Image (tube, helix red, strand yellow):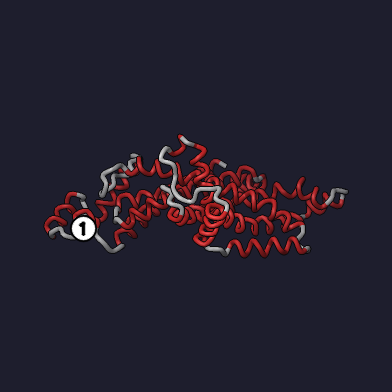
């Protein structure tokens, strides 16, 4: 187990290092000049060159990357070249919107996926089970923008019970308004994510129903549903742990679109604005933080999966022996 932990943490470090290099180089390929953005369209070439020199943009790429990487090791995400504010300060503020949005979306998705996915598996030969499967496939194909517009039209326009734009200036100091402002965006993402997860739950439940230990429990007198709940659901849950890790990336992508649609001051909206401003120092740190969150969540889920699955531990012991 110790060896596995060391390998996984080493892989995480290497993954972050490779991701930082790819992000840095990719952003330098994009057209445009941040010095020109700061100087304005009427600036002289000499003025643009002076700004580029002051920002260190005329230095070799390797030197710029090394300076950024050294700052990251000191937990310094840099400073915005456009506004002059520390990236970490603004990113912390934006994460206070994006994190709760992602968590609430995942919670809503789970509330949809687990009960309906299990019912779709138990009743897979009935009309209800087939209807749930068809609805999940349809919902998973719905674009996030269209789903968001429908949510606004129904809950903010027709019913007029939830706000459709913005986030309270006081933030989470006013928890009631903050929570209400995230409900529609979370429902938008959660319904689509729930439809995707539902199919995985259905597939895992069907596999559990056909497992030998579940069929043996049913043969000993337990009902099919009781045998699934007692002996099958732990296996289903274990199978879905890895799937939840993969869906974190989808939540991040959905948050970028939804924050724009609902005018939420989160990381996704900030990223879009900074890309438009060619604020490379902010964009590269923002993208790396998002990548790091996804990689860390994947590593934690992988370690958790290894710990709670006795078969994984047994295989590890055999290899170590």
Q: Give neighbour class at mark 1: few <14, some 14-19, many 20+ (Cα, 10 Å).
A: some
Q: Quadrant of the C terminus?
A: top right
Classify residue 70 as left or right of residue 310: left
Horizontally, residue 259 falls left or right of residue 242, namely left
If the image is split into quadrants, where does the N terminus sit?
A: top right
Residue that appears at 37% across and 57% down: 22
**In-front residue for pair 283/234:** 283
Instruction: Please name whichever residue, 283 or 28, is drawn nearer the observer in this view of the structure.
Output: 283
Q: How far from the left and from the top, in percent, is residue 262?
A: 46, 52
- Residue 143 is situated, as x and y percent measured from the top left of the image, at 52, 63
Q: Residue at x 52, y 44 (%)?
A: 180
Is residue 4 visible in the rendered image? The answer is no
Query: Measured from the top left, where is residue 175 in percent x and y?
Result: 50, 37
Residue wearing tag 1: 36
Pick the residue in front: 88 or 206. Answer: 88
Residue situated furthest top in the rendering: 173
Per the image, label 1 sits on a secondary structure element best described as helix
* Residue 239 pos. (x, y %): 64, 52
In the depicted structure, whether residue 123 falls above or below residue 107: below
């Amino acid at each position: 187990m110790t060896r596995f932990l060391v390998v996984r943490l080493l892989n995480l470090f290497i993954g972050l290092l490779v991701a930082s290099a790819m992000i840095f180089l990719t952003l330098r390929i994009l057209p445009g000049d941040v010095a020109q953005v700061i100087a304005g369209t009427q600036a002289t070439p000499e003025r643009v060159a002076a700004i580029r020199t002051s920002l260190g943009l005329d230095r070799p790429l390797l030197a710029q990357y090394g300076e950024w990487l050294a700052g990251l090791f000191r937990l310094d995400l840099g400073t915005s070249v456009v506004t002059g504010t520390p990236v970490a300060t603004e990113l912390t503020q934006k994460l206070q919107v994006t994190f709760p949005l992602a968590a609430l979306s995942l919670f809503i998705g789970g509330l949809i996926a687990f009960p309906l996915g299990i019912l779709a598996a138990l009743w897979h030969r009935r009309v209800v089970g087939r209807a749930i499967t068809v609805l999940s496939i349809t919902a998973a194909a719905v674009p996030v923008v269209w789903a968001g517009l429908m949510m606004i039209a129904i809950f903010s326009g027709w019913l007029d019970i939830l706000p459709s734009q913005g986030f309270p200036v006081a933030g989470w100091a006013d928890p009631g308004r903050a929570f209400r402002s995230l409900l529609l965006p979370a429902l938008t993402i959660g319904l689509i994510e729930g439809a995707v997860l539902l199919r995985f739950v259905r597939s895992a439940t069907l596999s559990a129903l056909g497992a030998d230990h579940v069929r043996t429990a049913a043969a000993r007198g337990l009902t099919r549903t009781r045998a699934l709940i007692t002996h099958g659901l732990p296996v289903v849950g274990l199978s879905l742990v890895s799937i939840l890790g993969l869906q974190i990336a989808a939540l991040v992508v959905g948050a970028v679109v939804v924050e724009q649609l609902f005018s939420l001051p989160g990381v996704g909206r900030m990223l879009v604005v900074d890309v438009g401003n060619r604020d490379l120092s902010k964009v590269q740190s923002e993208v790396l933080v998002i990548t790091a969150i996804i990689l860390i969540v994947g590593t934690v889920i992988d370690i958790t999966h290894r710990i709670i699955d006795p078969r994984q531990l047994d295989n590890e012991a055999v290899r170590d022996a």
